[in-house]
Image (cartoon, helix red, strand yellow):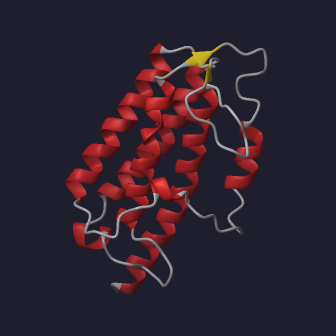
Amino acid sequence: MNEVVLNNFDRATHELVTLLSSLTEEELNKVPFENSWTAGQLGDHLFKSYAVVEILNGQVESTSRHPNEKLQDIKKLFFNFEIKMDSPKEILPTDEFIKKEVLLYGLKKRIKEQRNVILNKDLTKICTDFSIPEYGDFTRMEWIGFNTIHTQRHVQQLKNIISHLKTNNT
């Protein structure tokens, strides 16, 4: 099971880093269309959300439920691209200029930290340091799955941003 979790996480985060790496610093900070984040802000938002690694390494307890029980509901919500979601204020991106090198370094560091959890921790344990009000406590597997799904949603948005940037530059 951990191998599947790791492969899905690796695929999503690799695509994210590859797409962000393909942009110049100017493109990273350019608003592609009205009411959109820049590609850099999208990356910054994910960087901030990846701080969940602290929760993954925090207090845990055993559970009797299936360790990925809540992921279907999360997939259903996050893969509905017809709805616009509001980010929690704690992980809203900065309005400041985003340096590509700093963003990519930070993302890669937090991705590596999460990979270490997948490889070295019991993913069936419930994390008790923080819970999402609508869902309650997540297992480590659900937190990693949530991050994977969240990343996949934003990768689709990033592809749209890049498409607009390329179209507007021609």
Q: Residue 96 location, x and y as percent?
A: 28, 68
Query: In this rendering, is residue 159 above or below 153?
Result: below
Residue pictured at 70% horizontal, 67% vertical: 83
Q: Depth check: give the residue in front, 166 or 124.
A: 124
Q: Quadrant of the N terminus?
A: top right
Query: In this rendering, is residue 5 above or below 43?
Result: above
The answer to which image quadrant residue 124 occupies is top right
Residue pictured at 51% horizontal, 36% vertical: 9
Q: Residue 98 location, x and y as percent?
A: 26, 63
Q: Quadrant of the C terminus?
A: bottom left
Q: Is residue 78 left or right of residue 8?
A: right
Residue pictured at 48% horizontal, 37% vertical: 52
Residue pictured at 72% horizontal, 16% vertical: 63
Query: In this rendering, is residue 118 above or below 25?
Result: above
Q: Residue 138 location, x and y as percent?
A: 65, 31
Q: Is residue 36 left or right of residue 18?
A: right
